[in-house]
Amino acid sequence: MAGKGQVLGESLLGEEEEEEEEVDPGPPQIDPATGQVIPRPKKKKRRVNKMGRRKLLENLSNKPTDFQIRVKVLEARQLQGGNIQPVAKVTVANQTKQTRVKKSTNSPSWNEAFFFNFKKSPADLMDELVEFKVFNSKKLRSDSLIGSFKCDVGMVYLEPRHSFLHKWLLLSDPEDTMSGAKGYLKVCVCVIGPGDEAPSFKPVASEESDDIESNLLRPAGVQLQPATFTLKLYRAEDIPRMDSAFMQGVKKVFGIGEEQKELVDPYFVFSFAGKEVQSKIMYNNDHPDWNQILKIGIQFPSMCERLKFIVRDWDRMTEDDIVGTHYLPLSLMCSTGEFGFLPTFGPSFVNFYGSTREYSDLPDEYDDLNLGKGEGVAYRGRALVEIQTTLGELPEVPVEDINNDDILRVQKFMRRRKYKLHAAFLNATMVSAIDAPVEFEVSIGNYGNKLDENTAPCPSTTQPTNAVFDGCHYYFLPWSGTKPCVVVESSWEDISFRLEGLNLLLKIIDTLEANIEQVRIGIKAKLPTPELAQLLISLLDQLEQDCRKKLPEPTPGRHVSNELDRLTRDYREFELETIANNVIKLKTSATDVLEAMAEVENYLQILKNIAKEPQNSMPDVVIWMISGDKRLAYYRIPANEVLWSQNPDYIGRLCGRLQTLQLKFPGLKAEKEKVSEVPAMLRTKIWLGLANEDDAWHRMQTEGELAVYAETYENQCNIPVVGWTKKGPLGRPKWSDSQGKCSLPRESFEPPPGWRWEGDWYVSPELSMLFDKDAGHKTYMEECYEMHSRLPGTSWGPATRPWTDVKGDEMAPKDSVDLPPGWVWEDVWQIDLSRAVDEEGWEYCVESTMGGYGPVEKRYHLCRRRRWVRTRKLVEDAKQKKHKLIQEKKIEEAAEGWEYAPLFNLKFHATERTMDMVRRRRWHRKMICEKKGADCYFAMKFEGKKKDEDDKEDFNAAYAAPRMFLTFKKPFKYQMRAYIYQARDLLAGDETGLSDPYARLSFLTQSSVTEKKEKSLCPTWDQTLIFEELEIYGDPRAIEENPPEVMIELFDYDKFGSNEFLGRTKAVPMVKLDPADARMPVLQWYPISRGQEDGGELLAAFELFLVPDKNASMESLLAGSDLPFLPPKKGDLFLVPNGIRPVMQRTAIEVLCWGVRNMQKFQLSAVTSPSIEFECGGHVQESNVIKSTKKNPNFTENILFFDVMLPREELYMPPMNIRVRDHRQFGRKPTVGIHVLKSLEEFRCDPVQAELAEDDDGVQGGLVNGGRGGEHVIDMPAEERKVERKSGPQIGQPLKSFPQLELPALFRGKQEEPDPVVDEEIDWWSKYYASTGQTHKCKKYIEKGQDKIEVYQTHLEDVDFTNGFSDFCSTFELQRGKDEEDEESSVVGEFKGGFKVYPLPPDPNDEMPSKVFTNLPSSTPEECIVRVYVICGIDFQPNDTSGLADPYIEIILGNKKISDRDNYKPNTIDPVFGQMFELTTMLPVQKDLTIRIKDYDIISSDDVIGETTIDLENRYLSKVRATCGLQKSYCIAGVNQWRDCIKPRQILENYCKQNHVSGPHFYGNNSVKVGKKIHNLADYEPNKPVDPNVGPADERLALHVLHTLPMVKEHVETRPLFNPIQPGIEQGKIQMWVDIFPKSLGPPGPPFNIEARKAKDYVLRIIIWNTVDVVLDEESITGEKMSDIYVKGWVSGIDEKQKTDVHYRSLDGEGNFNWRFIFPFSYVPAEQVMEVRKKEHFWSLDETVQHLQPNIVIQVWDNDKFSMDDFLGTVSLNLNAMPMPAKKASSCKVSMLPDITTGSEVKLVSLFEQKRLRGFWPVYNDDTGTRTLTGKVEMEMELVSVEEAEERPAGQGQEEPNMNPKLDPPKRPETSFLWFTSPWKTLRYIIWRNYKWYFIGFLVLLLILLLVFLFLYSFPGEVSQWIVNG
């Protein structure tokens, strides 16, 4: 059985196997030779993967989201053990729920659903386990588990629709897996996230054969095997400090001194599938050598996906901290399939990442990162591990030590080689840290970490630089021509062969993705097929060529590879080979581009699956931005991306290439706090390679010169009187590094070996110091403060410092403030009155140094000040400015290069101020390398070092790292033009739901801003921004190849407070090195995003020109022509120039302005008089005002018309902005809702031709007047009608219908007599079940071939042809307020309307086409009757603790509410309602019909389970006529009686009129012309219908014609329910439909009766006559085999057991009983199920209704008086499908019974048809797992209805009335009695019968002995007598 089925490993191959359709869904076939199931033939099969791997779930979010996991436990089969009481438990992520206990069966049917709700992040949830366990509730808990199955949630999530539907799980014993299958459990599981549609758990109709083997989920391999994961844990290194040094300090004070300890106590935890094992703790050790083996016992193959390694730090007092977490996907370590292998890994290092390494005693805000949540921002150590899997055994001890051989063996894997990591920083822009100097640090592993004291210093950081304002908004670092470089030396194992293989695969993927994108663009641009084919062929050629590339192999001597390397390589080669071969096949066989693309996507997925390297032991490269001593932002790059290789195919894709990085803030804090700014943008080049290959890096730097400098700072402080001096309280050495941490005297520098000095030391001032505070500003406001003071009681006079700046430092008086050259004053000095000051501008305080100024003068105030301001403006052009800068630089350099600050840790500035207490200057000395590869670290020499100084300082100073720069001769000048045309669908920033957006662009060292557009979400700026004089260093050709990115950020302008961020996007400019280049940039839509949310799109284009140099020689690049002319101006702003802006054409937009609905209150009052404003492309049209929405929410004038110039290309179409204003008192018109319609494409149509329209009108006129003239013939006399009415419930036409084909009906000719029995089984439900395919519930109906209905598995709005009923008008949701992610929806109403867009003739004098919106229905309210039919509920979310609910229906329409609380359905989550509700309503005033399902509660208020809302107005207005579904046939009586208020002929006439179709013209009653087509009744009804209920011929014909039109047919829709508490998560579904009948059309027909079917009461009488061949279970005292037999029986589900009397001492297995069982039960004949109503618990209020199969269980038992009775055998018979009994006992065998595997071969009958059966049935026992025959029971079964049972009564057992038939007492053999109640019989039948010969023998012996005794006794006397008497 378990030989077939879907192996779990394979079920998730996803990309490997296409679904195979099975040819025949019939029962499984058995091979007679082997007894195995024969596999089914499959129709289509692609390749089966030989080496399967499970897909990985990647990039899962860490944001907690609502999830629901639904589990339905259906049934179990073949559970091991006979006569058990099974119960199933389901555990999901530590929440456990259990089913009911089923009595005495090993094939229980539970059919119970459980809902588990979580608020967890997807990343966490996917690792949780789902576990199914089945227990035997009778046994003691310890050994009651029968079997279990577990897998992780991720596995379910990867399946289609995130669900397992009707899958069989193979249960196994987790302890003893060799024991094989313990049974099968059938379940459905699905994982539902917000917005997911829940799949239905209803059984599929065709599943009657219930094919286990094709739906079996079993762990791969026939059965689960025990296995052991053996993790050899060798050592770890680089573990960061985790503990405070407090105790160390204390010990030092008390002199307990021991050597310096490492402050971390690590231990290692290995966990998998919920089990974990941990290593020993290594105290005070950051490089522990554990050398331990950790073992975990598992069931293999396991359903869990990730192994988890955690390094923890032991703490004595507090909870242990987590140092780092690493997840290892199991699927990367093993492979199923033909060439698969068991999980294996290493020996290899695994790296841990998490929060930053620096220790602080405060809690770490990024602690979450150490748990493996989110992207770790720093390296936290690595561990050397090896994993092996051994099958067939479980570990005895979890932890043991590694033997020495293994420790030696692993040494070779630890061989290190020297690597160098180079990085050059070309630009740092948009820098957010402006308070302190900024530096960037590059590290790999722990090398290069500047803040970690344990690492040797190396030049891993750029020099600290102050950020400079760029003239608009952002700051950049002014590195100009000297770009800082860093180099980090590190030592790692050489695993280049792994990383190179990965790089090769990633390059193949990149190429393939780029090519796929090209083909996609081609498809979008609708290229001709040959061109597309050409693109596709070149894609395939490239892919084949790439897949044939050779994967790198480990080089002996250089690389050390392990087993997994070899296996992974084989696996990858196999996959690449397969793809290459498939590509060749595809090239020859592909016919359709889209099909071929789907295939190529498949290959891409396979490539992505193999492009993962589990053993990547080289840590990632991390770049940090550090300001002060604080780490602010980071970026992480995998090492393989920047790895150098000799082979160009293997080089990392970013190695040595110029790339733009957007740094990120660490952790989730930035996301949570909605930090919008970019920390910084970097343009860098990074290179990683072996140290002896680093000349490759130097060769790449062709554009500038790499130079190395020694650096030291000279520090001084200002002491009063003395002035500036090096002596005194400096707080840092006289000569030091930039941080002042270690002493670096100039004279102690000696060039390292292999280096020499070039030139002498010189002062090199820091560049950012040379920028004034006004640098980059076009206008600048000078300010100074006039200070006054007084003594108490005196008047105000100038203070001791009469003029100061804002900090209180002394300044020159305002009139002597100098104007810098190139600036002019804009105005005179003015007092600043815009602050909290009095009318003369003064503000007062007690003491100026204390601050606390206020505007009111008090007597105790002794100081006052006022602010004078004066604005100056830059007039000279930029060249003079630059010239001036150079002049200043020279002046500065001529000066001494000092930079000043109040204290060393504050920001330095270039000119001395009064507050400055310290100053420093930077000295540099250039170095030249003489010997290749020599280290450039200085070994400092020190004399006379005092011993008591700290050793740490000593170490740091002993090595000093130089600074490195990439120096460029001169920059090239560029000009960038940004064409910003428009944006659409921006986020709303204001409460009105609008924004005032403007865009800010940043490009390298400049930024600029567009104008702001007021109140718009779709602004059209039409503006060109020009960036002049951009200086970019480096080769222009390199810039052309890899241009810098433009960053565009959008903001909402706010008058008060800071402007709100709306999102950002990036773009790459088109580079033109020759301005005469004729290419034109194309406007493109760039997606805008704000964090995770989508923020609209921006339409823009960018170009970057190299500015030609007039003096350049002809050969050089700069000898180009002049720049193109500037674009035209509008006011001060440049417009987007013509060749780039979209081409316009004259366009008409017709707006159908129908009405507004459901408007919510605005500012606490209702919206009653709205009007709507439509704006498109700057043109505005306004509707009229609705008088009162309460009376009629529709507009009286519906049509508005735009005649506007709009872009010809759809791509550039501006959106339509819809704005609703309310007209209130006092002329206020607030905006109460807006909607932005992004694209009008779906509303485009062709203009209506005028003449056609006229012609059509004519036809219409004719039709209305003369259409029906005298042609309507009634063909049925009245008497006939009466007869028909009498003929009873005879149902519609006997016509076979195929709803899926919508073919005309074909009538059957054979006349059928009404069958009176049938009719009770034919009801509306028969029609429903016939349509859903549940044929066993409606067999009679199907035999009569009656109508079916459409059953839609979704709501009617989603059915294809209805288009959401938007054909007349669409519904647009109106929003208001800001776009906040977490808030509930901001929908405040709906606008109903439509649009039609079509081109107009360009000449305004040409004739206009006629309007599209004509023939509109009346917009006045219409009174309607609404009938709501609710059929049943599916999978409701349970609200009670029992996992069930008591649902009832509540209907709300406008202010009417109908509650059906009295008819609640107890204890069910799949209720059958079968109810119809009728209401009246006014459309459109009350248009929203809400069907709410509530849960009945006695004590608390009723909870809402879920609700669904239907827009009745859309259905009423739609042309597809959704008011009342068309029936299949026109009947005037019966189940299918016509229910609409108008007849088919009238409907057809209305349709033709509405859709401008000529007709209908009837010719007689049997043919009609509609449009240009003639329809004949004979075509639709070839045979005359015999059903007497059918209506007149013309109506039938009209109905057939209607069925050919797109109209809603008679249907049932399935609507999902939602609950506001868990928005987005479905709470179940209901099946229902709605009919709407306008009262103006007359009264509706009779409603359908959909009441649920009622069960009938039956009595089952079973007479147990005899048993034969029962197993003899006991041995009597005398050693005979015997049994005391009795028979027990019950109906499973009702479980009231009845027993016969006991047939004692059966010696041959025969028992005689003549005993009657009587079982009453309820049964639904039409559905063939038994209805059981019983209370779950004695305290339950209601009976729970269950529908079960009518199974009768008969068991044979052996009676024991002093111990438990022994179970002998059982048989379970389904009354609907039971095997025929055997006539003779000899022919009764176990094979008569159906088995899972042999179900098809046994002939089954139904007792409901047979009514009576008599014969022998076998009973069996399957304790061992196989059925063994243990006896035969002769029974007679009779099924009678309750009425018959009353007429022919019969008593239970042998009680009165003992009749029908009368049962005589059984004739049992004399030997049958109970021994201790009949002593005489015991003597006679037990003792005498068995021992009589012993008794007789004993008596004979006694006689003989007596005779002998008498003889001997009398012999001597007699002899003597004889002698005497002689």
Image: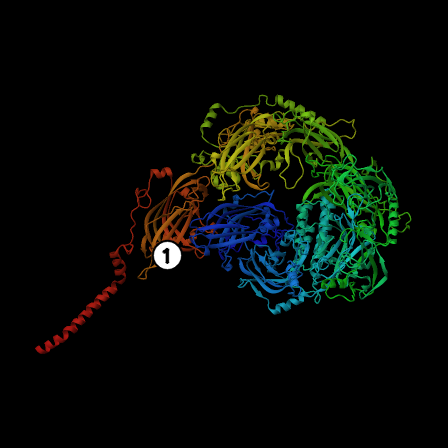
Query: Badge 1 local density, few (<14 within 10 Å), some, or many (20+)?
Result: many
Please tell me which residue is depicted at 73% across the width and 53% down the height of the picture: 626
User: Can you say whether 1361 is above or below 620 in the image?
Assistant: above
- Side (left or right) of 1615 relative to 1748: right
User: Can you say whether 1801 is above or below 863 in the image?
Assistant: below
Give the camera-side residue of 94 and 12.
Answer: 94
Where is mark 1, residue-wise? 1671
User: Can you say whether 1844 is above or below 234 in the image?
Assistant: above
Residue type at tag 1: Val
Which quadrant is the C terminus positioned in? bottom left
In this view, the residue farthest toward the left is 1925
Q: Quadrant of residue 1720?
A: top left
Number of callouts in the render? 1
* Residue 1257 appears in view: yes
Image x and y of residue 192, in percent: 58, 45
Give the camera-side residue of 407 and 262.
Answer: 262
Q: Quadrant of residue 1264?
A: top right
